[in-house]
Amino acid sequence: MDEAAPDRAWHEIVRDMLKLHNVSLVTYVPDNVLRPLIEVIEADPFFTCFVTTREEEALGIVAGAWMGGTHGIVLMQTSGFATLPNAIASLAVPFQIPVLLMVSERGTLGEFNIGQALVARTMRPVLDSLAMEHHTLTRLDEVEFIIDRSIRQAAATQAPVCFILSPLLTGGKVFQK
Amino acid sequence: MALTANQPLHREQAKIMNRFDITQRLVARLHRDEAVIGGIGYTNFDLWAAGRRPQNFYMLGSMGLAVPIALGAAIAQPQRQVIALEGDGSILMQLGSLTTVAHRAQKNLTIVILDNGTYQITGGQKAASEMGADIVAIARGAGIGQSAWAADESALEEMVDVALREDGPWLIGCRIDTGKPVDTTERDPARIRDQFMRGLGVKK
């Protein structure tokens, strides 16, 4: 077999890429889709991982840590991203701090909550208007390449990057009676 | 804890001090390349005016994030003392961050709140801190047990010395006046960030 089936789940690949690039600080506001990623990270002593009360706060912590020599990533869901434009536009971008953002995408492909569906539509226009690099992860076989290259680029160009975890990759969150 | 027990518990009992004067006094206590994160507005204007240190980071936006930025720097550099210098209006925007500092129990972090009870830079509108909110009491409620108001200038100096010497996290409340800042921070974020990283030894 030339094309071996990936032997790791998406969240295990993400964890391994973070370790490869020494991204050891993880701050997050909880989310159900992110739960397996948070669990494998919290189980690994390589990481310093903890919950914050707001996504802005999580970004500020990762920005401060970068300036102190530690690379980090912020985990959140789509509605949490919607609270971030000011912090991205007035901290990460102008100060050239390569914070990594990972957003589990709600609001599409079977969303049941109209609030999530509406706020989700603001995400890519905001990222584009900030000229911020972003990638939507839809396929398991692309996760490693996209994250590996993007972390390298973020550090080399001193620019933040956002990874969007599509329901096509994660299964998303579906309505259950 | 003995120290905080000796400080006044209520905001009204603390002396109203001059922002630039106490900022100078604070900076004068720094002898070991401590990092200082200056929150936006007059807080960091006077930090800038008190003398350029490569270990100072001057925010230019992202109101409320001085404490999170300081927490991140403290996590990255556990051997260095880190101070968040923040205004009352700013910390009121990000009170949740006090709970994060508390559950992290970050030993090398001190938060200094400069409280004049107003949004001075926008025209002096009253803040909640002037209408009953006691930020030191809020910090204690958030879980930062070592939180106290500075009774006056000499008490502040003593508290800063203790905070830099003994395990934190600490929060020191300072009531300040509405004096004009002495200077204005140069708004060159890339340069500020680069100098700060060199000041912390991250870049050579």
Image: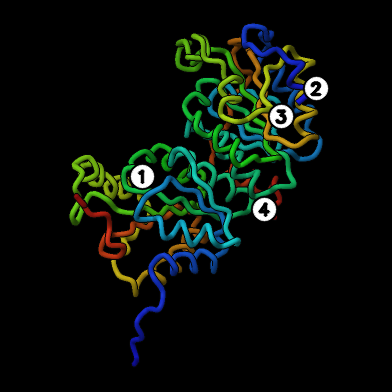
* Mark 4 residue element: loop
Decide: few, some or many residues near mark 1? Use Cα within 10 Å; few <14, some 14-19, many ≥20: many
* Mark 2 residue element: helix
View extreme (bottom): residue: A1
Q: Nearer the viewer, mark 4 or mark 3?
A: 4
Kind of residue at badge 3:
Gly
| Marks 2/1: CA–CA distance | 42 Å
> At 75% across and 14% down in the image, what residue appears?
B153
What residue is shown with label 2?
A: B158
What residue is shown with label 4?
A: B202
Residue B65 lies, with reference to residue A33, above or below; the image says above
Is A55 situated left or right of A25 in this image? left
Kind of residue at badge 2:
Glu
Dot 4 or dot 2: first in sequence order is 2
> At 75% across and 30% down in the image, what residue appears?
B163
| Marks 4/1: CA–CA distance | 29 Å
Decide: few, some or many residues near mark 2? Use Cα within 10 Å; few <14, some 14-19, many ≥20: few
Kind of residue at badge 1:
Phe
Number of on-image labels: 4
Q: Are marks 4 and 1 on the same chain?
A: no
Q: Chain of mark 2?
A: B
